[in-house]
Amino acid sequence: MTNVTILLAEGFEEAEALVPADLLLRAGAKVTLASIDGSETVVGSHGFRIGADCTIDAVDRSGTDCLILPGGKLGTDNLFSSIKVRSMIQDAVENGKIVAAICAAPSILGRMGLLDGRKYACYPGFESLVAGGIHTGKKVEQDDIFVTAEGMGVADEFGFFLIGLLFGAEKETEIREAVRK
């Protein structure tokens, strides 16, 4: 089974976490929403209270195939501030796992130096935090194990792209057609 972990920090953009989560579940992934601060409920940028499946400490890093970082300015700042989050990202990179970030969250990868010389997408205005990367202007971009996207308006395309990457083009097409009927 394909295991996806989505890290939730206070202030995360709800759609950027939940839309890809929903689409990946439909494709057959096991999706885990992990709170980074030990709480059972995480409050998003619009005040929605989302129940986490577990805390970051309980995530099986070796069993995670894809790590997703949703954006939201405060959520991104809180993710980057967490040593545990940065450690989990570094571990995923060292083990060749897919690391996906949307909206402001690619700036985390940029500040860690992980996008130096790599193509990326991000929310307009956050390019300066990915100074070593190559901003392509695409809505969703992939460079090696890194998948990045502009923001909430492309949360579905981000999810579909990840389905294609993790499950293949046929499954991506199947889920696209199923949700657009």
Image (tube, rainbow, N blue to C red):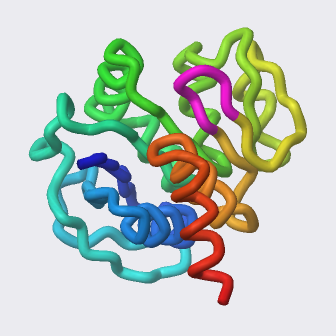
Quarter of the image where one finds residue 170? bottom right
* Nearer to me, 110 or 169: 169
Q: Which residues are magenta?
A: 142-147
Image position, residue 95 (x, y; %)? 32, 17
Q: Give the image location of residue 156, x and y in percent.
A: 64, 66
- In this image, 138 relative to 156: left or right? right
- Image spot of residue 15 (x, y percent): 56, 71
Q: In the rendered image, is residue 15 in sight?
A: yes
- Name, please, the residue furthest toward the bottom: 181
Whether residue 144 is in magenta: the answer is: yes
Above or below — where is 50 with respect to 134?
below
Image coordinates for residue 20, horizontal then vertical, percent: 51, 63
167 left or right of 104 in image: left
- What's the residue at 20%, 33% (across, down)? 61
Say if the magenta span includes residue 34: no
Q: What residue do we see at 75% from left, 18% from top? A: 133
In the foreground, 27 or 131: 27
Say which residue appears at 46% left-offset and 48% top-offset: 167
In the rendered image, the vertical position of residue 135 relative to residue 73, given as above or below: above
Quarter of the image containing the C terminus? bottom right
Q: Quadrant of residue 43?
A: bottom left
Query: Residue visible at 71% across and 57% down?
Result: 151
Which is more toward the observer, 70 or 22?
22
Q: Is residue 99 above or below residue 41?
A: above
Relative placement, left or right, of 142 versus 45 is: right
Q: Residue furthest front?
A: 170
**Magenta stretch, main secondary structure class:** strand
* Residue 72 in view (yes/no): no
